[in-house]
Amino acid sequence: MKTILLEYGNFYHIYNRGINGCNLFRENENYEYFLHLYDKYISPVAETFAWVLMRNHFHFLIRIKTVKELNLQGFQNLEGLKGTNRNGVNQQFANLFNAYTKAINKRYHRTGSLFEHPFRRIKVESDAHLKYFVYYIHHNPIHHGFCDHYLDYPWSSYLTIVSPKATKLSRAEVLKWFRDKSNFEKFHLQEEIRKFDELNIRLPGDL
């Protein structure tokens, strides 16, 4: 299947897992280091709206910045991000995965690939899709039996969105999709999205 290039200005659900289902995160420091690298490589080229890190996979809801936004930030000279070269954004993700793989291989004395390749992505087609993916990402730990409530899982953006603390997450825009924090919380209390079939979303397999 042909790899979809990430288009400037569009929203995507980004997800991936360990190769052959292997664990990506073994201890708290691993989660923290992955988020550090994510901020280093992805924050310059994309806004993040929701995320979750699971033991052997992850999910992010992002919007790739426009060429104008990148130029205003001084990235017009960054290799691979000139003009309309969308491959450069894909390369930022490759850099993230490569850097994390090197760190994990060194720490745990392993060799070879850590992530499945290529990483998977779904283009978000509507406002309903945006809300669904926020819900889906935050419910992932419940779906996989890691907790009974998303408030109990530390490695997702849910706690950040309901918190007043400063964050690089695009929290205000997420809450605007749900009108306010109260509606955001009520939306997440649903056991399933009743109009799911109408959204026509291509599900990410068993992740």
Image: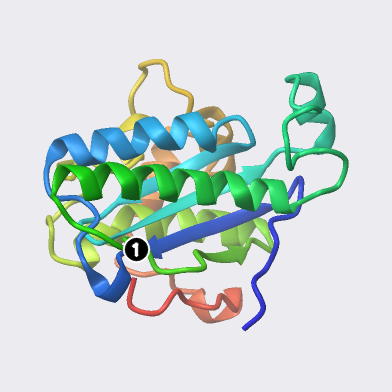
Q: Residue 108, position in %: x, y?
A: 13, 49
Residue drawn 63% across the image and 53% down it: 90
Residue drawn 34% across the image and 63% down it: 113
Q: Residue 146, position in %: x, y?
A: 13, 58
Q: Is residue 161 visible?
A: no
Residue drawn 64% across the image and 45% down it: 63
Q: Residue 80, position in %: x, y?
A: 74, 42
Q: Is residue 39 left or right of residue 69?
A: left
Q: Nearer the viewer, residue 3 or 47?
A: 3
Q: Residue 4, position in %: x, y?
A: 67, 68
Q: Nearer the viewer, residue 150 or 33?
A: 33
Q: Is residue 118 visible?
A: yes
**Quadrant for the N terminus in the image:** bottom right
- Element assignment for label 1: loop
Q: Is residue 13 left or right of residue 56?
A: right
Which color scheme does this rendered protein use? Answer: rainbow
Q: Which residue is mark 1?
A: 113
Marks counted in the figure total 1
In the rendered image, the vertical position of residue 67 relative to residue 58, given as above or below: above
Residue drawn 51% across the image and 41% down it: 49
**Quadrant for the C terminus in the image:** bottom left
- Badge 1: how crowded within 10 Å, few (<14), some, or many (20+)? some
The image quadrant of residue 19 is: bottom left
Q: Amino acid at mark 1?
A: Ser
In the rendered image, the vertical position of residue 135 relative to residue 170, given as above or below: below
